[in-house]
Image: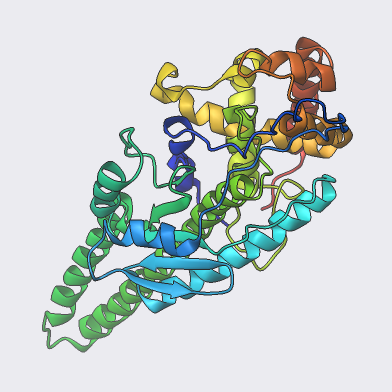
């Protein structure tokens, strides 16, 4: 299970704001005098470029330490070790499978991307930031951003958790503790009782250090899985046309679905039908503290620059909770809503954000009351359960 420390991690995708989408070729009008044929509603998809074109652009921005590793659906371009590459490849494959299931459940079967997709992974945060500023998104990255999907470049980029400052600090602390253990073990005494006591203390100390190393490694792996899945969802949803690339998907939809896919173990089913304990606990605490954004504000939100930094976490947790609640209790309306965003040519965004939402889900204020009441009831039930000894 992802540790509580991960609550501070924001798995953002700033490229969604910084980069324009590329719509499909527009429908041409009929020639003069020709018979008018019924025109099917147009579906707008991001036109995928061949992987070699995408890969060459990325390689032009990287040094020779980055090697391309291909599987059936992705090319992973990285300077990470084989163990990490294998882990990421497994998580990418699992995300594609769960994404396909989601599309089927929502009655929105999408053609999967025609070409392989590109995933770029750095081992160091500084290299990730440098690449993003020179060959990636135009907007600056904050310290809380550890990965993103760029619609314009069609790649996902992130860096390994071991490159995060908090993990480096933790490992530095373990190294100092190991030095202290070595000094303690080097102390000599002729007293057999004292020698036995020191041996037991050293064994206990070593066991604790081993456990801390184990926990830290597990945490890194869990967090890497969560980041990989989150960004892979963004990539798949755009390149498959699940997302309406005209701009109908406001940020709460993008991030609500992506956070609902987060998991610490892709060996099990994941997605909006499953619970993300990290996101759920954070949201319920904000709900209990009356610290949420008004639903109208959440639905119309389209610029992180307009949101104070301390409210960004609220946006993510609240988007997660709303998407998951709609998926569980308003799935038919959610199906129709997503279809309308993708297919209705009469809609203009962001002007019609609230209009089309209400057409499918009813008055916003009424839905907000029902949603939050359900969440409060769920929170109250959990609070009433006796804690385990």
Q: Quadrant of residue 336?
A: top right
Q: Residue at x 17, y 77 (%)?
A: 182
Residue at position x 59%, y 21% in the image: 289
| Residue ranking furthest to the front | 33
The image shows residue 306 at horizontal and vertical percentages of 43, 16
* Residue 148 in view (yes/no): yes
Residue 309 appears in which quarter of the rendering? top left
Instruction: Say above or below: 77 vs 284.
Output: below
Q: Would residue 381 be seen by someone viewing this image from the given angle?
A: no
Q: What's the coloring here? A: rainbow
Residue 40 image point, x, y percent = 83, 35
- x and y percentages locating residue 284 in the rendered image: 64, 31
Residue sitting at 60 percent across and 49 percent down? 239
Task: Report whether 37 appears left or right of 262.
Answer: right
Q: Nearer the viewer, residue 138 or 129?
A: 138
Q: Residue at x 33, y 79 (%)?
A: 203
Residue 115, percent across and down? 57, 62
| Image quarter in which the N terminus is found | bottom right
């Amino acid at each position: 299970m992802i540790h509580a420390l991960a609550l501070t991690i924001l798995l953002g995708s700033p490229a969604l704001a910084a980069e324009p989408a590329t719509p499909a070729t527009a429908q041409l009008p009929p020639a003069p005098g020709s018979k008018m044929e019924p025109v099917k509603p147009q579906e707008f998809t991001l036109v995928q470029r061949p992987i070699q074109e995408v890969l060459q652009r990325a390689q032009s921005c990287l040094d020779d330490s980055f090697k391309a590793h291909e599987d059936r659906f992705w090319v992973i371009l990285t300077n990470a070790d084989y163990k990490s590459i294998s882990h990421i490849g497994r998580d990418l494959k699992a995300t594609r499978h769960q994404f396909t299931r989601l599309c089927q459940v929502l009655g929105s079967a999408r053609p999967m991307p025609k070409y392989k997709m590109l995933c770029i992974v750095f081992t160091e945060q500084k290299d990730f930031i440098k690449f993003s500023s020179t060959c990636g998104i135009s907007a600056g990255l904050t310290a809380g951003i550890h990965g993103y999907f760029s619609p314009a470049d069609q790649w996902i980029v992130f860096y390994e958790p071991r490159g995060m400052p908090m993990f480096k600090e933790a490992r530095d602390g373990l190294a100092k503790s190991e030095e202290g253990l070595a000094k303690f073990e080097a102390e000599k005494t002729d007293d057999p009782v004292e020698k036995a006591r020191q041996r037991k203390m050293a064994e206990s100390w070593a066991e604790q250090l081993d456990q801390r190393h184990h926990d830290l490694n597990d945490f890194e792996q869990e967090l890497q899985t969560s980041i990989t899945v989150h960004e892979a969802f963004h990539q798949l949803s755009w390149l498959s046309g699940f997302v309406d690339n005209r701009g109908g998907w406001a940020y709460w939809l993008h991030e609500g679905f992506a956070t609902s896919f987060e998991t610490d173990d892709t060996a099990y089913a994941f997605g909006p039908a499953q619970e993300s304990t990290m996101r759920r606990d954070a949201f319920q605490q904000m709900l209990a503290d009356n610290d949420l954004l008004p639903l109208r504000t959440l639905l119309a939100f389209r610029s992180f620059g307009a949101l104070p930094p301390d409210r960004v976490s609220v946006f993510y947790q609240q988007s997660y909770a709303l998407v998951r609640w709609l998926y569980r209790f308003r799935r038919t309306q959610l199906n129709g809503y997503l279809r309308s965003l993708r297919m209705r040519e009469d809609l203009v965004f962001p002007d019609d954000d609230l209009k089309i939402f209400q057409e499918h889900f009813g008055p916003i204020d009424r839905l907000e009351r029902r949603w939050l009441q359900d969440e409060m009831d769920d929170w109250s039930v959990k609070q009433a359960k006796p804690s385990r000894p």
